[in-house]
Amino acid sequence: MSHRYSVVVLPGDGIGPELTAAAVAVLEAVQKTADFSLALDWHMAGAAVYRDTGRAMSDDTLAACRAAQATLKGPVGHPDVRGPDGTEAGVLGGILRPALDAYANVRPIRLYPGVTSALANRTAGSIDYVVVRENTEGLYASRGRGFVTADVALDTMVMTRQGCERVARRAFTLCRMRDGAPDDRRRRVTCVDKANVLRGFAFFREAFLGVAKEFPDVEAECLYADATAARLVQDPGHFDVLVMENFLGDILSDLGGGTIGGLGMCPSGNIGDRAAYFEPIHGSAPDIAGKDRANPISMILTAAMMLDWLGESATGSRIRAAVHAALGEGAVRIRPDGALVDGTRAAARAVVERLG
Ligand code: IPM
Ligand code: MN
């Protein structure tokens, strides 16, 4: 039987629409030989919508994201579009993550062939880990709620038992589906925190260790976030799955992106128990928007993650294999600084041509 999946598409701002076009071209190509199809429902949301309407996303669009089986979202935001409190107003994480209860932001960091890592002597596959970022609480729970006077500013970090346990469980479950860390092929989940300094992080760690007992087949380790930052640079092959608080995950996943050819190589899924949306981890890069220069690999790999979530991981893997081939053969070239050598459209075509 052929499935038809309902997918909301939010092309976003800046480079978002051209990246979305690239990912949709790949999705259309794979559907030709797959036994499922996607019903795409396009909506506008983000900084431009905020500028026009005073809200980054309409109620209708949010309802559509809730009702769909998945949402594919391009990067959003513009540095000049600010809310009354001075923070960026066009971003959607603060809306979609709580609304869909998408509590795990799954961010794979993988070095593909043909891509020069910023780290010396790194070959394809020698960096291959997943950052699981808690997505609904932590320090960013203070989003839109910080307390500021002329003399003091306060943002509060929130950890709940349920929030810590469910994201830890997601990390262990994901780890079981992988082949272990590149260096020793051991399945390992690393809890990243500052349990030595803040009680909230000690609470996160304790919840993690409790959940770890449910997964005796997976190695559980704890590492301080500062030491983790160094180790992700010096010894990335040690890592398999890392789980951490929201703000730490935001930062350390970008650090990881810096080691695999830049943020333009980084997809992600914001995943809850019932709903999910998928987006690259980077911003909307307004400086290169509309110039056919942005690297679409992040968004193409994001589309593949969406197919995994829909239960079509064989097709997701076909996309990843095509990306692997396109980069490995030099049909898509990434400069050491992360810039794409060929155009966005040409890169998408190169991937489409290699879909097995
Ligand atoms: C991300 C982004 C956003 C976030 C910002 C733009 C609000 O940094 O998704 O990584 O952290 O939520
Ligand atoms: Mn970020």
Image (spheres, rainbow, N blue to C red):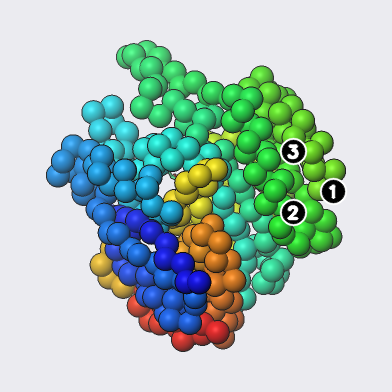
Label 3 CB-ligand 2 distance < 8 A: no
Label 2 CB-ligand 1 distance < 8 A: no
Nearest to the observer: residue 211 or residue 88? 211
* Residue 332 shows in the view: no
Q: Position of residue 117 (x, y in %)?
A: 61, 66
Q: Is residue 210 left or right of residue 291?
A: right
Residue, x 62% and y 38% (percent of image)?
167
Q: Position of residue 2 (x, y in %)?
A: 47, 71
Q: What residue type is disc 1 on?
A: Asp
Residue, x 68% and y 40% (percent of image)?
169
Q: Which residue is mark 1?
A: 217
The crowding category of the residue bearing disc 3, from other C-alpha atoms within 10 Å (few below 14, some 14 to 19, many at least 20), is some
Residue, x 35% and y 65% (percent of image)?
39
Tell me whether circle 3 and circle 1 mark residues in contact (CB < 8 Å): no
User: Please, what secondary structure does the residue beneath circle 2 have?
Assistant: helix
Nearest to the observer: residue 339 or residue 145? 145
Residue, x 51% and y 64% (percent of image)?
307
Q: CA distance from mark 3 to mark 1?
A: 19 Å
User: Please, what secondary structure does the residue beneath circle 1 have?
Assistant: loop
Q: Earlier in the sequence, mark 3 or mark 2?
A: 2
The label shown at residue 278 is: none
User: Please, what secondary structure does the residue beneath circle 3 have?
Assistant: strand
Q: Is residue 279 left or right of residue 205?
A: left
Quadrant of residue 43 within the rendered picture: bottom left
Q: Which residue is mark 3?
A: 223
Does residue 342 lie above or below 301 as drawn? below
Q: Position of residue 48 (x, y in %)?
A: 21, 49
The label shown at residue 176 is: 2
Residue found at the very far front of the displayed protein = 1
Q: Earlier in the sequence, mark 2 or mark 1?
A: 2
Tell me whether circle 2 and circle 1 mark residues in contact (CB < 8 Å): yes
Q: What residue type is disc 2 on?
A: Arg
